[in-house]
Amino acid sequence: MGEQREDLQRIVSTLANKKDEIVNFIDILKQTIRNVQVNSSNVFRELDKEFDALHSVLDEMKESMANTIQQERTEKIQALNNQLGQCSSALESSEELLECATTILNIKNPMEFSKAARQIKDRITACPAFRICLKPTISDNMSHLMVDFTLERHVLQALKFLPVPKVPEINTAACLVADNCVTVAWKMPEEDSRVDHFVLEYKKTDYDGLARVKDEQPWEVIDYVKDYVYTLSGLKFDKKYMTVRVQACNKALAGDYSDPVTLETKAFVFGLDDTSSHLNLKVEENYVEWDPTGGKGQEKAKGKENKGSGQYPVLKSNKRSGASPKRTSASRSAAKGCRDRFTGESYTVLGDTAIESGEHYWEATAQKDCKSYSVGVTYRNLGKFDQLGKTNSSWCIHINNWLQSTLSAKHNNKSKTLDLPITDRIGVYCNFDGGQLMFYNANSMELLYAFKTKFTQPLLPGFMVWCGGLSVSTCLQVPSVVKAFQKSVNGLNSSTCSLYSVPVMPIESSHC
């Protein structure tokens, strides 16, 4: 009896939900009927205006066109009324079954309840509410009955309703995703001189197939596109894909949208792991700032200063042995806080997503008052007292604006001063499989330095900040200029993790 009661309750609940859907759908149908009436009236008014201005030529055509509109309205309303009647009948049946089922649920005698439950279950299963289509069979759109009276008088004898523009076709072969820009190209199935403009719509998604209703993002609209190609620039690729569609419009109405096309927008997405950052660092989303009051009360670590570096005092590396457990590159840190916080004078924060393969790119922008900072990568085994570039498992570019301005590349406690202009924006390109780590002036896309090695463990983006702040830009694709230029360093080979410089060459390209 218990299982039967649960089955019946589930069915009753489903039926109740279906009832609510039918009630809502009836409202939609009624509104659709009102819209048909309003829109058809609007069409009549527009038609009257045109015929009044050109009545000498169009009087004999007006009646036939008005009849067409009347017939269209009559057919639409009749079809909608038929559907409305079906829905009303299904609703009445649902209400009757719900009342009956409620009565049965109150039966206490197991035998009587079991018999009644079987009977009502069969009736509910066969209820019309489960077979009815909750979509209007007729559209309330009457705009296809509009006419265009701008043609010369002698052409009016053959006047017809303005045709709906045909559906554009997106040319996937001509579409391009690069440099955080998406270029969409399309064509018309046949030439149509009456097309005035196009409407381009796009949305970001994590699905590469058909659009999902659940958690669906709204369409972003680009209106009045005059050409057959359009480039969306300055995008943040925080989703894996972008879906696009195009609609053609003439002076009076718009056609149907093209079939949606989904384009892959591959980019590296990560955040800052504030659970293991130094207490003197304040982390907010993708921004980290040095806070001199944040670490008060923590145990002060002692160590030797880095003589002659022109930066704040540093400690000798306290390296951990062994590597951290492996984590997939696409996953966020599943165990934040599992490692010790950085302490002492290692003002460090790491990214929460590891790199295990592929090519990736991100940027860091220093605030004007930032005195000293490092941008680089590290294995997970970076000790809590360690600094980027001072271990054999970390690589970085360091910029010092305190006392004197210097730019240097660091790895394995070795430093190479770079005779290059100081930049406030650094781009990092990491080719894990190819063993390439390249740092760029992200303002000019000039190569600052390149490391060539073989990465043996997953890499985490790393940042060190002292007296100032850094903004980290993720969701970025590898820029085209970087993809082209990195081939020039493929000839560098290394069996160790020493520093390797790459000649800086002028790059005549823009960075999107």
Image (cartoon, rainbow, N blue to C red):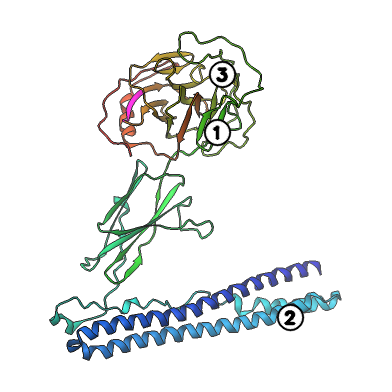
Which span is picked out in magenta? 444-448
Secondary structure type for disc 3: loop
List the single residue furthest toward the right: 109
Q: What is the residue that sits farthest to the left in this orientation?
A: 154
Tell me the residue that label 2 is attached to: 100
Check the image and report above or below for 187 versus 84.
Answer: above
Q: Which residue is mark 3?
A: 345
Between the residue at mark 3 and the residue at mark 2, the CA separation in whole angstroms equals 75 Å
Seen from the viewer's position, the closer of residues 17 and 126 is 17
Q: Upstream in the sequence, badge 1 or badge 2?
A: 2
Q: Nearer the viewer, residue 232 or 289?
A: 289
Q: Main secondary structure of the magenta part?
A: strand
Q: Is residue 389 above or below residue 73?
A: above
Instruction: State which tag comes first along the sequence, 1 or 3.
Output: 1
Viewer-nearest of labels 3 and 2?
3
Pointers 1 and 3 in contact (C-beta within 8 Å): no
In the depicted structure, whether residue 461 falls above or below residue 398: below
Q: Position of residue 171 (x, y in %)?
A: 30, 55
User: Which label's residue is closer to the chain start, 3 or 2?
Assistant: 2
- Residue shown at 51% from the left, 31% from the top: 288
173 lies above or below 391: below
- Contact (CB < 8 A) between labels 3 and 2? no
- Any mark on residue 283, and which? 1
Picture residue at 23% right of the left edge, 86% below the top: 52
The CA distance from mark 1 to mark 2 is 60 Å
